[in-house]
Image (cartoon, rainbow, N blue to C red):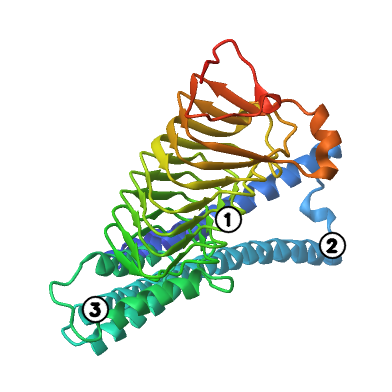
Amino acid sequence: MLAAVAISLGRRRPRLTFPQVRVRRGIAMSVLAWLFIAIVVAGGTAGGLLWFLGWPHLPNAAVFDVTQVLDLLKIALSVVAGFGGVVLLAVNYRKQRVTENEHALAVEKAKRETVQGFNERLGTAAEQLAHDSPAVRLTGVYALAGLADDWDDKRQVCVDVLCGYLRIAPEVVSPGEAEVRQAILRMFRDRLGPSGGWRRSPVDFDFTGVTFDNADFSELRFAGSVVFDRAEFLRDLTSFAGSVFVGGLSCHGTRFAAHHTTFARAWFTGKAEFVGAEFAGRELSFRGWEVAGGPVDFYRCRFLAERLDFSSLGLQAGVVRFGKLDFVDIELDLRNVVSNWVGDGGLARLTFEDVRFLRCRLDLETHSSHERMVWFVNSVLDTVTVAVDELEELKPWLTAAEPWLNFRDVELRGGTVVPERYLRRSAQQRLDH
């Protein structure tokens, strides 16, 4: 009743501003609610106690002596103090909520200020990257690199800006431009390397149309997708040795023209596409590569290298496919391809479909107990030397192993001979000598 009177008296006072009125009414309603709960609890407790005692008849006031009256007065004061404690609890609860809201607002304000500071740094770095002076552009590269380290949410934006800079080929190469581009690539290597901080970050890289000289992407881990469409790799060495591609690799129309190109010990846990790619160097090495996902496709590629090393392939799942392409005057090393295979049956395959082999040497090695692993479909082997290495210690095991070469609609021309004991027969097979 006193709370209701206080609220009614408060309403008769001059009107306050809206936020103050809302806060004052909020506190009053909170106190009133807690008092109501306390009265209900107290009333329920008293009623339950009286019911338990059988609703006893209370004596008249004249029966009580002075000591009992004082005891009753103490009980009443204790009840009043309890209600006062309820009011204090309600007020403290409201204060705590206000404190928490103020803290949340302060945190939100700090976040906004941080984001604003990051945006200002991004704008400044972008302006530096567009400056005429190579020294200022180099400063912009390092500024964007530092911002990408500090700003996880917008790391992709910083990477897109730097990749976009690489994609824009200058009409006139000014002094220092090569150093700026190398600094960008070094920054990527440092952060994707064995001790880099981006190895687990799903950042995508788009190098479409970029020209690389002596590109070194070895021992890097790309957690996001990587695009090298229409890119060109020149000079002496292009290395992806030991790199891991998790989110996928796209090489559509890519030209690998370095003297030596290597993907040795590379891991492909996502899809990899070499579509219309050209391998024009002297040697291409995929030795010891691992395919843990896939598929990995070589489709309509041009292999102009003298030697292709695809040996020691380890395929845990998926398919490695060569489709609609020619191997001409090339030594193709497929030795030890199936020794590391973990998949079963159709889940793990090496397939050549619509492929023409002309004046090639095909080196194989029989280490597989899995049939249907290596497939040649709708292909032509013209003047091809098929060499199958047999290790002495494996001959007893190989004798009991199932044939592992699968030919379907394959033509053997120009004296090409395939050892019959490795060839798995099927009703659709046709060998034309």
Query: Toward the viewer: 382 or 139?
Result: 382
Q: Which element carries disc 1, helix, strand or loop?
A: helix
Question: CA–CA distance between discs 1 and 2?
Answer: 28 Å
- Residue positioned 31% across, 58% down in the render: 231
Residue 152 horizontal/vertical position (percent): 44, 67
When the figure is inspected, residue 116 is found, relative to residue 61, above or below; the finding is: below
Image spot of residue 111 (x, y percent): 40, 71
Say the numbered circle drawn on residue 35.
Answer: 1
Residue 260 spot, x, y in % from top left: 45, 63
Look at the numbered disc 2 and give the secondary structure of its residue. helix
- Which disc number belongs to residue 129? 3
Q: Amino acid at mark 1?
A: Leu
Residue underneath mark 2: 68
Classify residue 290 as left or right of residue 394. left
**Outermost residue toward the left in this view:** 171
Q: In the rendered structure, which disc, 1 or 2, sits on the residue that comes first in sequence?
A: 1
In space, the residues marked 3 and 2 are separated at their CA atoms by 90 Å
Disc with the residue nearer the chain's start (3 vs 1)? 1
Q: Given the image, on which type of amino acid does mark 2 rest? A: Gln
Kind of residue at badge 3? Leu
Q: Position of residue 61 (x, y in %)?
A: 77, 54
Looking at the image, residue 183 lies above or below residue 163? below
Res. 201 visible in picture: yes
Image point (20%, 79%), residue name:
127
